[in-house]
Image: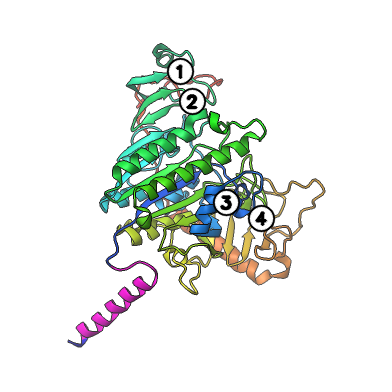
Amino acid sequence: MKTLHNFLIVLIAILASWTSMGVAADAPRPNVILIFIDDMGYGDVGFNGATIPQTPNLDRMATEGMKFTDFYVGCAVCSGSRTSLLTGCHYQRLSMNAVLFPNSNRGLHPDEVTLADMLKEAGYRTACIGKWHLGHLPPCLPTHQGFDSYWGIPYSNDMWIDPANKLSSEIVLRDGLVLADLQAGHKAKNVVPILRDEEVIEYPADQTTITRRYTEEAIRWITEKREEPFFLYLPHTMVHLPLAVSEAFNNPDKDLITNAIEEVDWSVGEILRTVQSAGIDDNTLIVFTSDNGAAVGSSLPLRARKSSVYDGGIREPTLMWWPGKIPAGAVCREVAASIDMMPTLARLCGGELPERKIDGQDIWPLMAGVEGAQSPHEAYVLMHGPGTVRSGKWKFYPWQEGKGRQARDNATWQPSADPYQLYDTVADIGETTNVASEHPQIVQRLKRVYEAHVAEIKANRRPTAEMIRPGNAISPERPGRVEKTPVKK
């Protein structure tokens, strides 16, 4: 009897704690919309101080929700970042390449549990609309990774079509192409297909309409699924090069990057309006972030840009919106990361975490604005490129300044001679002054953290999956290169 009494006390305490964090024990599970922009920088949005691109919908989302100032992604380029977001794992743990191409032979293993797998098992309807970039052939396509449906460009918009992709019997061909051209292996850089589920339904994609069409597809799907719990993953193609906008946003008085950012902002506004007009806004969580730093726009005031592990490459403009659950107008300055979506959504949506190790942590206390809530990451470690560690206010690099990509834009800058780098990101958000020599104990502690992380990942890597390419398929090699003998499977 005493054991039962103690158990009930513990159970009541857990339920009370759950409720105090903004989610009642019997609350309905939220719909989830995850908006993932391509190559949008920290300084590309009004809520982070941008004055040239006008982003009223994102700024409104920040006013009605929470801004995260120190939110990190899992890679400074495309595929690695998407892997981390969808699996809660560092991409190196899953043996994924940082960037996949149409001639890549391997992709995300379908045995890995994605957010879509987890939420589908929990009773959610799931869809991916947009850029996938985790494998463009079976068994790596979204429909093999927990998504009920897929519509979008399967990789970056500066790539080319793989002749092995299955063509729909109702394919729409553009720019004067005919079916015989594709059957003969037509390929060109920046000319990419649109897939529905696993078939090419349009080639080449009209990139001037892609942001608008992703938005229209998303609105249609949300409207159809509004009566049941749903998970929508909306990874935009823009603002990745080559930039393109629809006629409505083709303002000749503005730079193309500004127009592209403003069309993405319009898209966010349309999603918000759809959710509110459907009457499901009080039970819908919307997360907005980017896959890596700016390629064309601005990552200021952060240092460097896309491809770099300085903060300008991996610290992203991020918003969380859920009326009544996430406090309006709040700002979270704690370290959080895209890998944290998996355990956080498992908690909120009643999902079961994978049996195999993941790297993310539950950040709901941060999102709910719980007083005194702190980052669950004592140290957030990235192995991408030459590597880095963020721990509290400190950012550590286990390599000498001047050795990594995009170290400085200033031609008069002289790198520090110290073999390591350490920056106080609170006092020095632009990472301009290396203070490693002033804090040798912190340097050594974070160096050990980094080395332990690398050793653990290397000892516990899991495999990718080999994509299935028909034996008679034409070579997927990059256009302009000498064609190789077709890969036989």
Which residue type does callout 4 highlight?
Trp
x%, y% of residue 399?
66, 55
**Which secondary structure, mark 3?**
helix
Q: Nearer the viewer, residue 435 or 73?
A: 73
Q: Identify which amino acid the numbered label 2 is placed on.
A: Asp
Tell me the distance, in whole angstroms, between the alpha carbons under discs 4 and 1.
49 Å
- Look at the image and say whether residue 345 sits in the magenta stretch: no
Question: Which residue is identified by label 1?
Answer: 174
Figure check: 279 above or below 154: below
Do labels 1 and 2 touch, CB within 8 Å? yes
Q: How far apart, in angstroms, are the residues tagged by discs 4 and 2?
A: 43 Å
Q: Is 9 covered by the magenta stretch?
A: yes
Q: Residue furthest bottom?
A: 2
- Secondary structure, mark 1, is loop
Q: In terms of sequence position, does the residue under pointer 4 or pointer 2 come before the other? A: 2
Q: Which disc is residue 314 wearing?
A: 3
Cα separation between marks 3 and 1: 37 Å
The stretch of residues the image draws in magenta is: 3-25
